Amino acid sequence: MSLSIQRASQGAQRWEISFTTVTTEDTEADFILGTVTGLTTTDTMVMPQLPSVVKNNTATANLTISVAQTAGASSVTVVSDGVIQKGSFIKFSNHDKLYMVTADVSAGTAPISIHPKLKQAVATTDTMLTGDSVLFTYFRDIDNLTGLTFSDGVLSQAGTITLVGSFY
C-alpha cells in the first residue's frame, strides 16, 4: 500500500486548475500562512474564464429560465439581456455542476446549448448564473502545492498550486 492519497467517485465532473504563484516581499508571510491554514477544507473562487470570453459577454450575472428542463437536456431556454459567448462557463442556482456554453447566444429569449447535459432538472424559479457568479468549489491540500523553495531562509519560489474540484 502506498502513502499517496486517492480519491475516487463515479458520475462526477472533475476539474483541475494549476497556476504558478507570484509573491512580493510584502506577501511572503501571508502566502506561507495561507498555505498551511485551512488545509483539507473546501473553498470557492470565481471560475476562471478566457479573457476574450469575458470581454465579449454582455449578459448580466443572473438570467431567468423561461422554460423548465429535465435532467439530460442539452439546452436551456433563458431570457438574456446580452451576449453569452461560446466557451463561457455557467451554473444554475439549484445545483453546483459547471457547464460550458457551446454556441454563441444573443440577447432575447433563446435556448442555450450546454455541455455536458443537465445533471439535474431546472425550473423557471431557478436562474442561470454567468460571469463572476460562477463559483468553482475546490479542495485544499498541501499535496496540491509543488515547487515551494527557500534560499537562505527566504522564500525564493512560491511554487505551483493545483486546485481540484468535483461536481455531481
Image (cartoon, grey):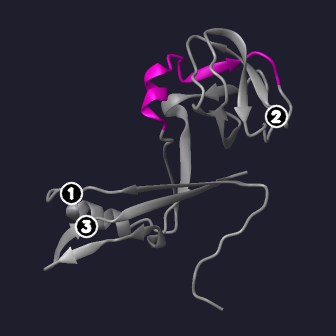
The percent coordinates of residue 60 (x first, y second) are 53, 18
- Marks 3 and 1, how far apart in space? 13 Å
Relative placement, left or right, of 131 versus 107 is left
- 137 is higher (above) or lower (below) than 161: above
Q: Which mark is residue 157?
A: 3
Relative placement, left or right, of 12 versus 155 is right
Which element carries disc 1, helix, strand or loop? loop
Q: Which mark is residue 27?
A: 1
Q: Amino acid at mark 2?
A: Ala
Tell me how many marks there are: 3
Residue mark closest to the camera, 3 vs 1: 3
Please tell me how crowded label 1 is: few (under 14), some (14-19), or many (20+) other residues with Cα within 10 Å. few
Q: Give whichever of 41, 52 is nearer the camera.
A: 52
Q: Amino acid at mark 3?
A: Gln
Please tell me how crowded label 2 is: few (under 14), some (14-19), or many (20+) other residues with Cα within 10 Å. some
Q: Which mark is residue 121?
A: 2
Q: Are marks 2 and 1 in contact (CB under 8 Å)?
A: no
- Marks 2 and 1, how far apart in space? 44 Å
The percent coordinates of residue 23 (x first, y second) are 23, 57
Residue interval drawn in magenta: 49-68
Q: Amino acid at mark 1?
A: Thr
- The residue sitting at 76% across, 15% down in the picture is 66
- Mark 3 or mark 1: name the one nearer the start of the chain: 1
